[in-house]
Amino acid sequence: MVESRWEELTDEDLLNLHQESALEDELHDDEEPTNKNNDFSQKDFEEVFSMVESLKQKLMYADPDIDRSMQVRRQIDDIFLPYLKIYENHLLLSSAIRSNA
């Protein structure tokens, strides 16, 4: 039954379906709100970093292999380093704005 449906579709039909699907995806993307222009708030950063620290502490206490847990902790730090830099820049900018006001 499935084979008969596929055989009925021509190359042109498949191309039209693909184009319609791409158009629907494009329209759907336009409808979704984006946060590209919005940075994390200071509170968001602090919540994330608190969760990361909790995770690292939990791993340290739960994993009997100290070398492995330390390696994972370092990798977690590396993963979140871009966010830490953004947060530090955000703090510096906020501090500069307050001192100029």
Image (cartoon, helix red, strand yellow):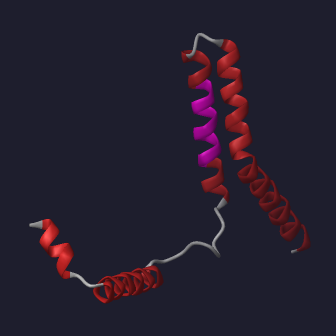
Above or below residue 20? Residue 59 is above
Above or below residue 17? Residue 85 is above
Q: Residue furthest left?
A: 1
Above or below residue 10? Residue 97 is above
Task: Find out whether residue 9 is within the magenta segment.
Answer: no
Judge left or right: residue 80 versus residue 27: right
Residue shown at the point (64%, 34%) measured from the top left: 53
Q: Which is more toward the observer, 71 or 61?
A: 71
Judge left or right: residue 50 versus residue 91: left
- Locate the N terminus by quadrant: bottom left
User: Horizontal and vertical percent for residue 23?
Assistant: 40, 87
Q: Residue 94 is drawn in which quadrant?
A: bottom right
Q: Which is more toward the observer, 99 or 83?
A: 83
Q: Residue 6 is drawn in which quadrant?
A: bottom left
Residue shown at the point (78%, 61%) measured from the top left: 90
Q: Which is more toward the observer, 96 or 7?
A: 7
Residue shown at the point (75%, 46%) measured from the top left: 81
Q: Residue 56 is drawn in which quadrant?
A: top right
Judge left or right: residue 55 versus residue 72: left
Q: Which residues are magenta?
A: 47-57
User: Horizontal and vertical percent for residue 25?
Assistant: 41, 80
Task: Find out whether residue 53 is within the magenta segment.
Answer: yes
User: Horizontal and vertical percent for residue 12?
Assistant: 32, 89
Q: Main SS of the magenta segment?
A: helix
Residue shown at the point (37%, 81%) measured from the top left: 18
User: Horizontal and vertical percent for residue 44?
Assistant: 60, 55
- Locate the C terminus by quadrant: bottom right
Above or below residue 13? Residue 34 is above
Q: Which is more toward the observer, 47 or 4?
A: 4
Q: Residue furthest right?
A: 100
Q: Residue furthest top?
A: 64
